[in-house]
Amino acid sequence: MNPPVPFLDLAATHQEVAEAITQAWAQILAASSFIGGSHVEGFERDWAAYCQTSFAVGVGNGTDALVLALRALDVGAGDEVILPANTFVATTEAVVLAGAVPRFVDVDPDTLLMGAAHVEEALSERTAAVIAVHLFGQMCDMDALAQFCSRRGLALVEDAAQAHGATWRGRRAGSIGDIGCFSFYPGKNLGALGDGGAVVTDDAALAGRVRSMADHGRRAGSKYVHDVVGTNSRLDNVQAAALQIKLPHLDGWNDARRQAIRWYADALEGHDARLVRVVPDAQSVHHLAAVLVPRRDEVAAVLAEQGVASGVHYPVPCHRQAAYAPYASGPLPVCEDAADRLLSLPLFPTITREQVARVGATVRDALPVEVRRAS
């Protein structure tokens, strides 16, 4: 029996940085500097530079990043926010938590990304903002979205939780909209040792509002003066230290993911297991190796029997979730079809060509007989 192929291998990736993180933890422990501190300041500086933005503000997690971004943009009660239905539920959750109403749209069948034409179909007098979700590591057409939002006077938020280091025509994820939001959940391309998040922007006032609201609404430079209603959502020094140590490795890890996707493309060529398309203007960082297959659950079951882990991102689109169905306005066929067929294959920076070949062969063997014969 071949050794199992994990869906994600964080231990192997952490071996490259374990000694530096251990040293940083010892320093933080000795100084008892846990909330705020030099690592937070250093990571915010480094992350802003990496994202090609003027400011970065560390927060508690990616969901908070979205909520705070919307609140800082004064999006709330009475407003509608347009977003794709095929996203992790946190994107929709953030809109509702900010007090606004989500307006779901469909996506392109090849890239599974939202475009300006989708946004235009959902536009109403109440539309205040658009959230561009860079799903699976590929950025949306940000030129078209930015131009559309600018003409209509709409705020443009980038949900870049799966797109650390991705680019659209050379510009980094988070740097094109009014504000970009990131999650540093451990499984992300740049992951912390627990929860963490950040917003990035070129707008000093917007960054200041997020920083204040994330710290109980405190006035800058004051401990006990609170100008706005805030919350407690701060990136801690331990997570910031780990992220700062990992950041110089991110581009190399993303290159390794791209290489693995090329191996997958070769392994699956000519079979009815289609990788999500990457358009020429985008450089994806392939947070997930997402393929569209027939009879997805049957294929996943065969993979599991052969010791190959897989995932589904996401089996229920947001407009069909019980909590958010009241906001649905009708069927979204592309999102619904993808939810039935998407399968995420093992992908991590240290995955080997042999592992990818084995996964590919197992997928081919798992496809329904009539599909394999047709191929």
Image: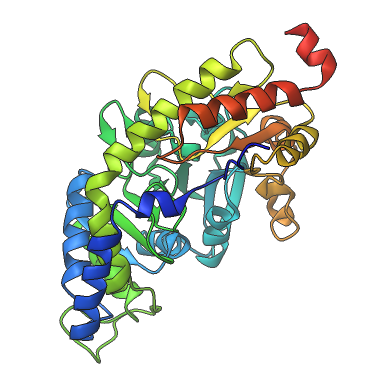
Q: Is residue 263 visible?
A: yes
Q: Is residue 328 left or right of residue 356?
A: right
Residue furthest top as drawn:
374
Residue 107 pos. (x, y %): 59, 31
Residue under the point 44% across and 59% down: 62
Question: Looking at the picture, how far across and down is residue 27, in whole percent?
Answer: 19, 77
Position of residue 297 relative to residue 270, above or below, is below
Residue nearest the viewer, comparing 171 with 241: 241
Q: Quadrant of the C terminus?
A: top right
Residue 173 picture quarter: top left
Answer left or right for 314 relative to 288: right
**Which quadrant: the N terminus?**
top right
**Residue 318, above or below 140:** below
Say which quarter of the image contains residue 239: bottom left
The location of residue 249, given as percent across then percent down, is 26, 45
Q: Residue furthest front?
A: 1
- The answer to whether residue 206 is seen in the rendering is no
